[in-house]
Image: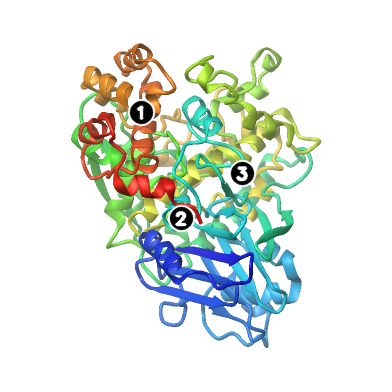
Amino acid sequence: MCGIAGVMMRDGSAPDQAVLDRLLAALAHRGPDGQGRLVRGDTALVHTRLAIIDLETGDQPLFAPSGAALVGNGEIYNNPELRAQMAGTPFRTRSDCEPALFLYEAEGEDFAARLRGMFALAIHDPARGRVVLTRDPFGIKPLYYVQMVTAFAFASEPQALIAAGFARAAAAPRQRAELLQLKFTTGAETAFPGIERVLPGETLVIERGAIVERRRRAALPPGPPEPIGHAEAMHKLDAVLLDSVAVHLRSDVPYGLFLSGGIDSAALLALMTRATGQRIQALTVGWEGAGAVDESHEAARLAKVMGAACHRLEMTARDFWTLAPRIAAAIDDPTADAAVLPTYMLGQAAAGSLKVTLCGEGADELFGGYSRYRKRRAPWRWLARKPRTKGLFGGVAALAGWRDGIAAAEGAVAAGRSPLQATQEVDVLEWLPNDLLTKLDRCLMAHGVEGRTPFLDPVVADFAFRLPDAEKVGLRFGKVLLRDWLARAFPEAGAYARKKGFKPPVGAWMAAQGLTLGRLVAAQPGIAEVLPADQVAAAFAAAEANPQRAWSLLYYALWHSHHVMGLPADGDIGAVLEAASRPCSVSRTGAARAMARP
């Protein structure tokens, strides 16, 4: 896992070294183990390294004999198989990204189709005067870009492009509306005007600082569900999951597991133990106080049954009060998902002992875990409204247009899908990359930790998405086949227990300071331009009953204070919001970033 960035000037001049310095500094947390830089003619590539594979010779950029150069962020899990298939290729390192460079030379812009992994890659091809960017089909690894009159620039995080002066620190109105109504933003455009995402599975070709070609690889296979018997499906699922976990364990550094106590991470625990025959290191997190939904003790019990070593963290109200500003600062591409809080703490705890952790993201989307999927399959589904038709704040005028991105994704669903598949596909297109995977990437990379997602594997997706709807969703449960498999493979895991979720008691924590938070959040400039103070106060007065409304407001206030106003995030919630509400509270750094233009 690493950070990458680059610049291609449109007038043929060399990129400014001071700009490259700022890109490297902004991405240093993603790669604490080293830096690389390449400047050739009108193009520059930079790289910050988190060393996972090939610790000795894997520094980047990587070079092919023709002169093509690559910088990459991620892991190519089928690196050994690719090298065996490419016998005679003059590899210079053991880096898992090096085969991608030679595949590009042999197959051109379609090279990424043979890669199994999570990745965001950039290749400079001097012979053809181009830069090629590509991202894995699920969007596990991020990549952003800016197109300007003077240059094309890209980076692993938007804040790096802002720090380097390629974009201004401002909030885009439509994305602000999406964030507050949906908890995440959709499509290519980000919350920062002018900064766009390379879409999941997309490959871009850039020449003379302009995009000249786009192509995209789908994450999900085409067509409707395919018939398969339950016994055969169980047999194939076992082989598919074991294979995926085995390749995701390829690492030259210590690895472990985030164990929530739910069925997804329990399945990974069983598979990791089976694949390695070793004692697995696990981390779990619980909450302070009685009454909160806390599965950490169940996680510890499962770890003991499986012979794993499990360390339990406890998140307190004080942790919430002090960590929330730092978390909002770490997640520059914003997501108001309260699970960012425990995920950040897990990343913090893993740092120093584990560089790689396996995580359960993607199981719900591929195997049918959400209650909205059951509604799409129920006999009365024609009476149920589509998912996400009612925003958190209803018809607030300042939040108009919030559903446009979701509607576009619904319109892009491939032909022939079942209603259940169509809902899954929308989630895979938008919710998964722009909420869950962004959360995972930023919360872990803030601490130099790599999160791997074995459920989000092309082999798993090709199998799971084609399953009959009845193997995914029943009237009482989702993830039917996965639960049946877990009941056989790890009976102690309670495969048929109701899903509780990974939800800290933010409602109770905010309610304890409801009056203060209502006042401070209402006075924050980013919130004040959207909602009147009485509506904000009402949201915090009802925080315990409806925690998401209050948390979305608080998160956006903290995000806006840091990423738009430029205020530091090293104080607690009260200190950060007090500073934001003062007249002329934009910091000098924030003002300079807002005015910086290339």
What amino acid type is highlighted by mark number 2? Gly
Amino acid tagged 1: Pro
Q: CA distance from mark 2 to mark 3?
A: 20 Å
Q: Is residue 597 above or below residue 524?
A: below
- Other residues around mark 3 within 10 Å, as few (<14) / some (14–19) / many (≥20): some
Choose mark 2 or mark 3, whichever is in front: 2
Q: Amino acid at mark 3?
A: Ala
Point out residue 238 in the picture as x, y percentages from the top left corner: 58, 52
In this view, the residue in front, 515 or 586, is 586
Residue, disc 1 = 525
**Residue underneath mark 2:** 165
Query: Image quarter for residue 49?
Result: bottom left
Q: Which residue appears at 60% of the width and 20% of the height?
A: 389
Kindly tell me whether residue 519 is visible in this rendering. yes
Q: How many marks?
A: 3
Query: In front here: 421 or 586?
Result: 586
Labels 2 & 1 near each other (Cβ < 8 A): no
Q: Is residue 45 above or below residue 148?
A: below
- 176 with respect to 42 (left or right): left
Looking at the rendered structure, which numbered label has been put on residue 170? none
**Element class at badge 3:** loop
Name the image colouring: rainbow
Counting residues from the start of the chain, the first of labels 2 and 1 encountered is 2
Foreground residue among 105 and 569: 569
Q: Which residue is mark 3?
A: 188
Find residue 71 and report its horizontal and vertical position in percent. 54, 70
- Mark earlier in primary sequence (2, 3): 2
Specify the quadrant of the image occupied by residue 11. bottom right
